[in-house]
Amino acid sequence: MAKTDAYWEKPLGDLTAAEWESLCDGCGRCCLVKLEDEDTGRIYFTDVACRLLDVETCRCADYAHRRRKVRDCLKLTPDLAASLHWLPPTCAYRLRAEGRPLAWWHPLVSGSPETVHEAGISVRGRVELTETDLKVDDYTNHIVSWPGRSPRAARKRSA
C-alpha cells in the first residue's frame, strides 16, 4: 500500500481530537430523528431534523452545547462509530471504522464543503420540519428511506 499524508486514512484511534472532528462531512443525516421499533430493534429514519440542525448549512447551530440541549444527542467516538449500525452508509465515521476510504465528495478529499451537497448526500433541501414542529405521534408520518442509502449520483462524480 502506498504511503499517504492523508491523516483521515489513519486508524481512528490515532486521530487527534481536531482530526476526528474534521471527519464529519456536514451531511446532517445523523441529525435526523430516528425511530426504533421496540419489538424488533429496527431503526427508521425520518425527514424530521433535530431542533439544533441548521437545514441550510447542515451543521449544528450550537455544537458546543448540543448535548446539554438535546437529551439524546450522542458524542460519537471510534467505538460508537464501529457499533452504531444506524449511521448512514455515507458517513465518514462509519466508512473509516469499516476500513473503507472517504468518497470523492467528502470535503477532506474534494477540498470543498459544497461537494457533499452537490453529490446529493446532505439533507439540504430534503428537510423542512424540525422536532419542535411536530407532535411525537406524527413522526411516523415522516419515515423515509433515503438517509439509509447512498444516492446513485454520489457513486460517480459527474464530468
Image (tube, helix red, strand yellow):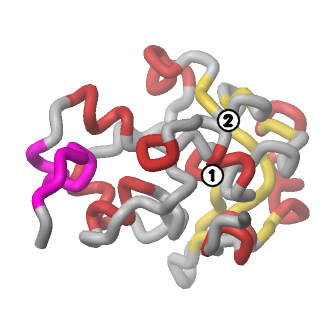
What is the distance, in whole Å, between disc 2 and disc 1 at their CAs? 8 Å
Q: Position of residue 61 (x, y in %)?
A: 63, 19
Tell whether position 5 is magenta: yes
Q: Which residues are magenta?
A: 3-14
Residue depicted at x 13% and y 66%: 2
| Disc assigned to residue 63 | none
Q: Residue 114's image quarter? A: top right
Q: Please state which amino acid type lies under the numbered disc 1.
A: Arg
Tell whether position 128 is magenta: no
Q: Is residue 22 left or right of residue 4?
A: right
Residue depicted at x 29% and y 55%: 80
> Extreme bottom residue here?
40
Q: Position of residue 25 (x, y in %)?
A: 51, 44
Q: Looking at the rendering, in which quadrant would you find the C terminus?
A: bottom right
Q: Nearer the viewer, residue 71 or 49?
A: 49
Note whether 112 is above or below 139 in the view shown.
above
Q: Please state which amino acid type lies under the numbered disc 2.
A: Cys
Q: Position of residue 147 (x, y in %)?
A: 67, 64
Note whether 99 is above or below 20 in the view shown.
below
| Disc assigned to residue 29 | 1
| Disc assigned to residue 58 | 2
Q: Residues within 10 Å of mark 2 (few under 14, many from 20)?
A: many
Q: Residue 129's image quarter? A: top right
